[in-house]
Amino acid sequence: MPVESLMVSLPAPKPLRLGEASLFLDLDGTLAPIAARPQDVRPDARRTRLLDVLKEGLGGRLAVVSGRTLEDIDRILEDRIVCVAAVHGLVLRDCDGSLHLPEPHPGMSQATAALREFAKRDSGLLVEEKGPSVALHFRLARARALDARALARRIAAETGLVLQEGDMVEELRTPGPSKGDAVRGFMETPAFRDTAPVFVGDDATDEHGFAEVGRLGGFGVLVGRPRETHARFGLRNVEDVLAWLEAAR
């Protein structure tokens, strides 16, 4: 599916028809506002109630596909979602609860040590270890952005780790499945098969998901500012996402 060239905002999607869809949701910037520190995102009663309603209406065809760790997703969403692809698709929990965990890349220890050494330069720099990946957050140290990005590129070149660039974060991950691969895997299971997949996300890391649902006959919904994207529709912010999901029937 070709990338849309955006000059104006994408149209908002029509209310979701739950009986015909399978729904894939990113977390940060989609279900929850982005926080300065990842640990600052906490459970929310409105969101938890909504997930319960969606899960029932979709007959279980609801998955969270996020860069977060599995433990973080369960904490924030209060264990409501069984079907989860965490760490950008590297960690998978099937809808029957089965776990699929990759072996961390040999370069992970080198990358983590280098990022931790760099983080000593500024108290606003935060290193997040995720098992098969490690992330350097600099939302609270924006003056370090150029140096952080340069360091991450160098580490990726030296180790063979995959560089995953995000919103005020550089992540180095074990090579392996993407968010799009996770969507395809879920859609191949009997519960999800023969429905239209919908992926809602905000970051560049969600583009693999947008592309895959488009290939499978569904559509993506981009949350936030317009950009070049595989998504067909757009919503302005987390509040709009929640309102749209609450209107689903």
Image (spheres, rainbow, N blue to C red):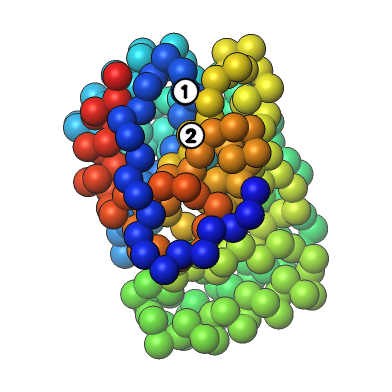
**Of the residues shown, which amino acid type is indicated by label 1?**
Ala
For label 2, the SS is strand
Up/down of 233 relative to 146, above or below:
above
**Of the residues shown, which amino acid type is indicated by label 2?**
Val
Using residue 46 as the reference point, say whether residue 6 is left or right of it.
right
Q: Quarter of the image containing the C terminus?
A: top left
For label 1, the SS is strand
Residue 198 badge: 2
Nearer the observer, 226 or 237: 226
Q: Residue at x 79, y 69 (%)?
A: 159
Quote the CA–CA distance across marks 1 and 2.
7 Å
- Residue 89 can be seen in this image: no
Q: Residue at x 49, y 43 (%)?
A: 220
N-terminal of the two: label 1 or label 2? 1
Using residue 201 as the reference point, say whether residue 101 is left or right of it.
right
Using residue 33 as the reference point, say whether residue 45 is left or right of it.
left
Q: Quadrant of residue 177?
A: top right
Residue identified by numbered label 1: 21
- Assess disc 2: are there few (<14), some (14-19) or many (≥20) residues with their C-alpha within 10 Å of its C-alpha: many
- Residue 50 can be seen in this image: yes
- The spot of residue 74 in percent (x, y) is 42, 33
Q: Residue at x 39, y 19 (%)?
A: 18
Q: Quadrant of residue 243?
A: top left
Up/down of 125 relative to 227, above or below:
below
- The spot of residue 14 in percent (x, y) is 33, 34
- The spot of residue 149 in percent (x, y) is 57, 79
- Assess disc 1: are there few (<14), some (14-19) or many (≥20) residues with their C-alpha within 10 Å of its C-alpha: many
Using residue 80 as the reference point, say whether residue 156 is left or right of it.
right
CB within 8 Å, label 1 to label 2? yes
